[in-house]
Image (cartoon, coloured by chain):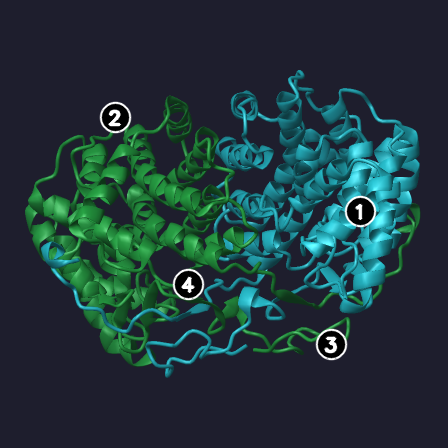
Chain colours: A green, B cyan
Amino acid sequence: MTTYSEEFKLVARPGEISFSKGLDGVVAAESTKSYVDGLGGRLVYHGHPIEELAEESTFEEVFFLLLYDRLPTAAELARFTGQLQQHREIPEEIYAIVRDHAARRGVHPMTVLRTAISALAVFDEHAEEDTPETHQAQAVQITSKMATVAAAIGRVRSGQAIVHPRSDLSHAANYFYMMMGRVPDAFEARLTDVLLILHADHESNASTFAALVVKSTLADTYSAVVAGIAALKGPLHGGANEQVMKMLESIGSPERVAAWLDEAMAQKKKIMGFGHRVYKTMDPRATILRGYAREVTRRAGTERWLVMAEQIEKTMVEKFAQKGIWPNVDFFSGVVMASLGIDPSMFTPLFAVGRSAGWVAHAWEQRQDNRLFRPRFVYVGPESEPYIPLAERK
Amino acid sequence: MTTYSEEFKLVARPGEISFSKGLDGVVAAESTKSYVDGLGGRLVYHGHPIEELAEESTFEEVFFLLLYDRLPTAAELARFTGQLQQHREIPEEIYAIVRDHAARRGVHPMTVLRTAISALAVFDEHAEEDTPETHQAQAVQITSKMATVAAAIGRVRSGQAIVHPRSDLSHAANYFYMMMGRVPDAFEARLTDVLLILHADHESNASTFAALVVKSTLADTYSAVVAGIAALKGPLHGGANEQVMKMLESIGSPERVAAWLDEAMAQKKKIMGFGHRVYKTMDPRATILRGYAREVTRRAGTERWLVMAEQIEKTMVEKFAQKGIWPNVDFFSGVVMASLGIDPSMFTPLFAVGRSAGWVAHAWEQRQDNRLFRPRFVYVGPESEPYIPLAERK
């Protein structure tokens, strides 16, 4: 890892200038939002351990915490919740895009989410204003509407009628209601809330970082969030939980786990849901979700998924824990979400509904003390090439 | 600037850990695409100085060079040009989005471009395939269609009928034709080509970097380009050339330049079009564009803009050149584009039509030797905060 000096010669031979690929271990910014303790296995949102928030808090409260760096009073929370409720509905033009695009074969739900959130800016008359008020208003509105768009995409994909938002439910309960077409019971509502809380922020992950690079040009918050969605879509980021469920489904039953794992390891296949750039021990979010997995699989009659997951976990931890490879959040979230009745293709949109809070909170933090993200690339191409006229090229 | 060690304590007081804000001077990747010599005032695309390409080459050839790291043979260029021509048309559904969104008051053209390019993925049946063939096909298709979408946005904004692409013109001539509704003469076609060549790539600028962060999650190329558009929209990036024209228009006439500059400097106003993160001397693109500005302002009868620009340049260089503040590409590009008949609101979309080549070339380079971009943020929030029950908070 090195900084770039203008004295470097024009042509660097590959590998000649050391740098950290993928910016691994490089500090890109300061933040008050969240801390990931990769060796201790801790995740903290502004001073509050994730276990405490998953136990005591709600998505609304966590979103307020991330945006404003403190827990709200009762009156502030009521007002903030009211704002989130009031902005849930989306224009008919956005439903039209969702209806047309999400119904098409082979279209990724995150593609539709990306387009729809981008299009929402058109219907915000303050989208181009760069004031503290509009930044905070956009943060709330985008996060509120993200749930509506994501749920609508799922309904259209499965050929069901779109369910419009209700304004009398919590963010999590209303999201479940729009996805499933029925109001959740207390357990389902709580588990949806916990999923959104656990996914709300995670320091400098790739999607948050993409959102910040965009925000640093002083682009509007819609632009920043669209970049976040674009990055989360990638299989190395938001797509991993879906891959875990595909893995479990392809294994099929608990008695086939051992043979499947042996073969996968012999082929040096990547086992989805294990390992993390920062965590070198158990991801605290995975521990929380494993706790919920017991109850939700029992209710759904999907205990076999949990049995299989725990068999895989046991073998993997025995073999790889010493190398710092442990289950990450994606490993148990797939089992939990599938058991809640969510189609695997809609796992990443749920991730986006939660992470929206982190994207807009970090974007607002960036805006308050901005500097354009503009690193250097080391040029490893030729110093000088002759310009041979077209007719003479071979 | 430092790398992050897990041994750092949880709470860093602001400023305690040194890092480079905005990743200024930090190397983020290796690239064979372009080299910016900030002290020497040189820009090189894969071994070819920008002056040579602006003189000898075409956008098609430069795009091939950036994508494949060599100049094409005559046969290859003919095939590549044919591919770009063949993919120009866009689905009626995309025109419908452009017609609806671009006609609305106060909507930024880059907002519409971002949505429309995002939506294009829906109509690409190979959008989700991660193969060398699909990456290269998407690179060509997106860059081809970017011009069509950008031109259509301009037509709708100015209340004119959309002009569909022709397949018998060069990329630049066809773009001009779709913008203006008439085939350009040789000078106009060449100048449009030069504008696209000069904007095609610029190392690790913020929009290219945003595109790479997205691509590094193994997201599709549409996702990467959408992030590039989102970043280019920001006034600190693509929006600067529009600000230069607004400045000239607000000054109004050459005789008012001196008084305007005195007042602006007394108020410590930022003079748009000057200074660059990397260039500490004259931006070579600005020199090339100043050359074209003479002819295009004479043809358009807009010589006063150039006179004003050169007065501002003279004063600014006298005062600030020693501090490394010089005219950048945006300073003369506004005068040139406006004199070509392009509305200032459509300057940044033209920048995107050119830069699309760089975005997709860097995305393909990233994909061939990928590592997820995932830096660290230093946490400067509280180590531990008590969770006070809601009713007891004050």
Which amino acid is tagged 1? Ala
Res B134 quadrant in image: top right
First of labels 2, 3 by sequence position? 3
Q: CA distance from mark 3 to mark 4?
A: 29 Å
Disc number for residue A204: 4
- Label 3: element kind: loop
Q: Nearer the viewer, mark 1 or mark 4?
A: 1
**What residue sits right under mark 1 in the picture?**
B259
Which amino acid is tagged 4? Ser
Q: Position of residue B140 (x, y in %)?
A: 65, 41
Q: Residues within 10 Å of mark 1 (few under 14, many from 20)?
A: few
Res A90 quadrant in image: top left
**What residue sits right under mark 2 in the picture?**
A160
- Label 4: element kind: loop
Q: Nearer the viewer, mark 2 or mark 3?
A: 3
Q: Nearer the viewer, mark 3 or mark 1?
A: 1
Q: Residue at x 92, y 45 (%)?
A: A391
Q: CA distance from mark 2 to mark 3?
A: 60 Å
Which amino acid is tagged 2? Gln
| Residue A189 falls left or right of residue B299 | left
